[in-house]
Amino acid sequence: MQRPAPAAASPELSARPRRRSFTTQDKRHILANADRAAAVGGIGAILRREGIYSSALTDWRRQRDAGAFSALAPVRRGPKAAKTNPLTAELALLQRDNARLSLRLTRAEAIIELQKKWPSCWAAR
């Protein structure tokens, strides 16, 4: 029994779905349309046409009313990049220097111990 070949993926679909993002102009345009919608069900029609939820419209209105037009810009998701500490490079340098000096100290102590034992070795002969 031979299996049929798998159907080829549609060239219109991407391999990985991406989250839809709206530009500031898109958000302002949608808000203006929603504000003008006076008929019953007008806002629902706009939401269906744009493919967004009413909660997104509420958030955008709140941001607009707060006067934060820059807040309408899309927010980058995920963990925020940590600010670099200017002392990090100095700390790394000092830690390397400390490790190097600790190694020198260990070697010097070993040589001193050997020098202490050296006369007793010659005295026995």
Image: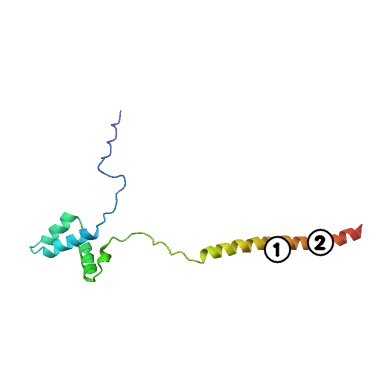
Q: Where is residue 16 in the image (x, y as percent from the top left)?
A: 31, 47
According to the image, label 1 marks what residue? 105
Outermost residue, right side: 125
Q: In which quarter of the image is residue 101?
A: bottom right
Asked if residue 3 is positioned above or below residue 112 in the image, the reply reads: above
Frontmost residue, 100 versus 17: 100
Q: In this view, does 120 lie to the left or right of 7?
A: right
Picture residue at 14% right of the left edge, 60% below the top: 44
Asked if residue 59 is positioned above or below residue 15 in the image, the reply reads: below
Picture residue at 17% right of the left edge, 60% below the top: 30
Dot 2 lies on which element? helix
Frontmost residue, 2 versus 84: 84
Q: Residues within 10 Å of mark 2 (few under 14, many from 20)?
A: few
- Disc 2 marks which amino acid? Gln
Picture residue at 14% right of the left edge, 61% below the top: 33
Residue 14's disc number: none
Q: Identify the image quadrant of the C terminus.
A: bottom right
- Disc 1 marks which amino acid? Leu
C-alpha gap between disc 2 and disc 1: 15 Å
Outermost residue, bottom side: 66
The colour mode here is rainbow
Q: How crowded is mark 1: few (under 14 residues within 10 Å), some or many (20 or more)?
A: few
According to the image, label 2 marks what residue? 115
Q: In this view, does 62 lie to the left or right of 115?
A: left
Nearer-N-terminus badge (2/1): 1
Q: Position of residue 17 (x, y in %)?
A: 29, 49
Q: Where is residue 96 in the image (x, y as percent from the top left)?
A: 60, 61
Outermost residue, top side: 1
Dot 1 lies on which element? helix
Q: In which quarter of the image is residue 49?
A: bottom left
Q: In this view, does 96 lie to the left or right of 52?
A: right
Q: Position of residue 22 (x, y in %)?
A: 24, 57
